Image (cartoon, grey):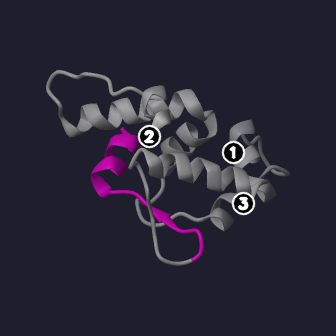
Amino acid sequence: MKSQDRFPLEEYGNRSVLTTWTISYGQVQRQSEEAAWLLKLWGFLDSGEIWYELIAAGVYLAAMMRIPGWLLAVAEDELAFGEAMGLLSRYSLVEGKKGPGSHSMHSVLHRWCGH
């Protein structure tokens, strides 16, 4: 409870879901570039589940094409992926699924990320 003051709630006018997600995304972006970019990338993939091994496959693509540094950082380190997903989960942008390390995103949020 002592750490609650570190991230004070921001006031917002119309209190829409989009506004809430935008504020949450802004907090994620300030704390982790990798998590923010991962959420954006996910917007171009299926809204269904995502897991580490899927992202880790990006390491193999690096030999054939230029891969952004943030993606390589998450793809090469399962702990970094877990930290990014943990941050996204704390802001309710993704949800952990039953099973080993799988996460999903609500379809409305998925549309917002793709936009």
- Residue 72 picture location, percent across and down: 75, 46
Q: Are marks 2 and 3 in contact (CB under 8 Å)?
A: no
10 Å crowding of disc 3: few (<14), some (14-19), many (20+): some
Q: Secondary structure at mark 3?
A: helix
Q: Secondary structure at mark 2?
A: loop
Q: CA distance from mark 2 to mark 3?
A: 36 Å
Of residues 109 and 80, the one drawn nearer to the viewer in this rendering:
80
Name the residue at the front extreme.
2
Q: Which residue is mark 1?
A: 71
Q: Do the residues bearing badges 3 and 1 touch, measured as CB atoms within 8 Å?
A: no
The residues bearing labels 2 and 1 have C-alpha atoms spaced at a distance of: 33 Å
Task: Name the quadrant of the C terminus.
Answer: top left
Q: Where 112 falls versus 26 (above or below)?
A: below
Image location of residue 101, percent across then percent down: 58, 68
Q: Which mark is residue 56?
A: 3
Looking at the rendered structure, which numbered label has been put on residue 1?
A: 2
Mark 1: amino acid:
Leu
Q: Magenta stretch?
A: 100-115
**Left/right of residue 21 with respect to residue 13 in the rendered view:** right
Q: CA distance from mark 3 to mark 1?
A: 9 Å
Going by the numbered disc 2, the residue's amino acid type is: Met
> Which residue appears at 38% of the width and 26% of the height?
8
Camera-side residue of 3 and 93: 3
**Secondary structure under badge 1?**
helix
